Image: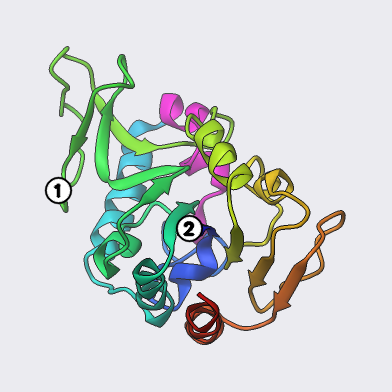
Amino acid sequence: MKRIVILTGAGMSAESGIATFRDHGGLWRTHRMADLATPEAWKRNPELVLEFYNQRRKQLFEVSPNKGHLALTKLEKKYDVKIVTQNVDDLHERAGSSNVLHLHGELRKASSTVDPDLVYDIGEKPIKMGDLCEKGSQLRPYIVWFGEPVPMIHEASQLASRADIFIVIGTSMVVYPAANLIHKVKDVIPKYYVDPQAFDVHGVRNLTVIKQKAGIGVPTLVDELLKKA
């Protein structure tokens, strides 16, 4: 069974109503990214950071997977599918995808501030100051903030290097290290890039650019790949 590895970004979930830094109001608009999503922000004002992620977590339970998410699940009928996502929502899982690797963390989870291996599924619950892990330290969002290492990038790179087909959906290809994954794919492997702003990535061979939103471009691409399987 051929292996398909899929990298998804914010554009994958935008059609479900998941906001991005670029288009949302509220805390997104009145505060800089450095005030909300960095280790320095957490040290400086943890209450504000918790409020920001509590809002995002609440929003997550008000949206549903879109046609793009649902289409990807169909590939599992004929392919070994691995999804590497930059998104912190769980829309891939809720759509029915079986193998999802989250590069930047997950909104539905909290982690210990003293032991990153202590991770808790909190669902819809907010994290409050005074919520402690079993070692007695404050819980924080289970998110890889700007400036922090990306623990799962090595595993993602291994997946990309073994792909028989590689697909990029809804990402600007400017956020590293995720944007470098396409360069881990073998030259001879077919690659697809689905995004309204998609472009020919320098140095990448066998790349098909599909300038469409995920909800339109992904179902069409999935149908084509299923016919070829």
Left or right: 62, with 88 as reference point: left
Q: Amino acid at mark 2?
A: Trp
Q: Nearer the viewer, mark 1 or mark 2?
A: 1
Q: Which label's residue is closer to the chain start, 1 or 2?
A: 2
Secondary structure beneath disc 1? loop
Q: How many marks?
A: 2
For mark 1, does the 10 Å Cα neighbourhood hold few (<14), some (14 to 19), or many (20 or more) residues?
Answer: few
Whether residue 3 is in magenta: the answer is: no
Residue 109 image offset from top left, x and y in percent: 25, 41
**Residue 30 in magenta?**
yes
Residue at coordinates 56% horizontally, 48% vertically from top-left?
A: 32
| Residue 128 appears in the picture as rendered | no
Q: Residue at x 62, y 83 (%)?
A: 212
The residue that disc 1 covers is 125
Percent from the top left, x then y, of residue 14?
47, 72
Q: Position of residue 202 (x, y in %)?
A: 86, 57
On screen, residue 81 versus residue 191, left or right, reads left
Q: Amino acid at mark 1?
A: Lys
Task: Kindly report the secondary structure that dominates the magenta region of the rendered protein.
Answer: helix
Question: How far across and down, in percent of the image, does residue 20 sit?
Answer: 50, 63
Q: Quick one: SS at disc 2?
A: helix
- Residue indicated by mark 2: 28
**Is residue 42 at all visible to an observer of this figure?**
yes
Question: How was the colour assigned to the protein in this rendering?
Answer: rainbow
Above-or-below relation of 153 to 178: above
What span is in magenta? 28-44
